[in-house]
Image (tube, grey):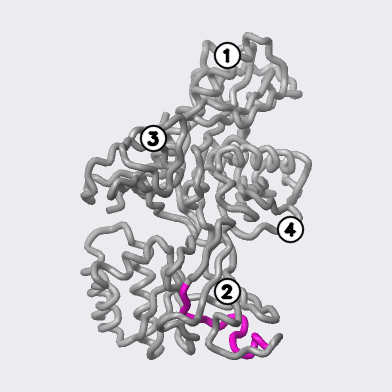
Amino acid sequence: MSEESSNKSNSESARKLVLPGDLVETKSKPGKGIFRKDGRIYSSVLGHAHDKSGYINVNAITGRYKPKTGDKIVAICAETGPSIWRMDIGSAFNSTLHHSESSWKVPFGDTARFLAIGDAIWAEVFMVDAAGSHQISLKKDDCRKLYSGTIVKIDPTNVPRVIGKQGSMITTIRENTQTRIQIGQNGYIWIDGKGEDIALAQKAIETINQEATSKGLTKKIEKLLEK
Amino acid sequence: MAGQTDMKLIKNGVRLDGRKPDELREVKIVAGVLDNADGSCYLEWGNNKVYAGVFGPMECHPRHKQKADRAIVQARYTMAPFSVNDRKRPGYDRRSTEISYIASQAFERVVMVEEFPKASIRVDMQVVEAHAGTRCAAITAASVALADAGIPMRDMIPACASGKVNDVVVLDLNKEEDNYGQADLPLAIIPSTGEVVLLQLDGHLTPDEFEQAMDLATSGCMDLYEKMRNALDNRYGGSA
């Protein structure tokens, strides 16, 4: 039967794996990654339970990217329409980029001239509706089209690992490889620089993705980059 | 069931492969074995070998199968040509179509399909080696793969068969028992509620024997559920 998991502390060692259908003992209000049955709270995904500021969440370890308003992402053009682009952002559905959300003045039917299939952009999710469809925008902050460079795809749940505490990990990679890197919340990472530098940064990021759960990762990556 | 033999399948309460009537074959489950799938699982159950891969949730194709208010689960069960003694003609047949359909229905009971309108969750189950009980093995493996893929579910569903051999109700039939036995009853349940999501019966059982077979299969499912949990624990339990 379902194993009970109490989550009294948030310390790393006390973190316990919860599986779908596991009872989560808590007095907090239900957040995400859970479902309620008979007044009790159960986990709906494979992950770790967090009891934080009155809410209980189960953060999934695996799974596709779920767009959230305000997320900065790397998107790849998958389809073009007369006035929209359909962008691959690694979630269940492709995201829509309307021409009015771009910085270009696009004549009707001429979308592919600005963004063709395979082209990448740095964009922001600006609308997610209840039905799960979402739109992204190129008009915010530093959003732009990405020229040259490479895109590496990792598990979106490992994105915080690649960034590190206060950006420590990504700073290490940037400084050691002399590359420009933009990390999308969706797990798509854009790297630009010299050929061998890109390859090294890519290797580092892929290593982090594969070994996201192991300890002492920063040291390992530093060693890998020194070579 | 149809096969005839003079072979004694149970001698002094011990079966051909040395098991007791209420014993499972050895089960080995490994989660997360395929790189290209969102979630995956490899399962060995006796001589059965099964791979399961989960893709999605993603846009449902063909479009006419989309449901505006929920996702659908598209399960696919296939046997490799080399999985059985006589080469199996590859591709869909009546049997695999049936198993795919009942597996889809079983998974739709536990997967939170209402969270992903218009989407489809594809579950591919590939039998690499078959030795009786592959539909149960495939469903069990697919459950682990679904959890591995991070798909929200109410529970995981273990599946296990029981049956009747030499007038004895036994758990988890092997190939000989399946071919020459008297009944085969595959069962899949939701462990937390005891709800039955898949139940088939091939052969004959008296009402008493049926009850006995159900109890046996249920306990088999529960044992299996622990093994599924361990597999996921081994994969993700060490995470900091």
The answer to whether tags 3 and 1 share a subunit is no
Work out whether residue B162 or residue B191 is closer to the camera in this orientation and state it.
B191
Q: Amino acid at mark 2?
A: Met
Distance (Cα) linking label 2 and label 1 = 55 Å
Magenta stretch holds residue A123? yes
**On screen, residue B11 above or below A42:** above
**On screen, residue A213 above or below B88:** below
Work out whether residue B41 or residue A151 is closer to the camera in this orientation and state it.
A151
Dot in front, 2 or 1: 2
Magenta stretch holds residue B33? no
Dot in front, 3 or 1: 3
**What span is colored magenta in the figure?**
A110-124
Numbered disc 4: what chain?
B
Q: Position of residue A122 (x, y in %)?
A: 46, 80
Q: Amino acid at mark 4?
A: Pro
Work out whether residue B193 or residue B40 is closer to the camera in this orientation and state it.
B193
List the residue tagged with mark 2: A87
Q: Residue at x 60, y 41 (%)?
A: B107
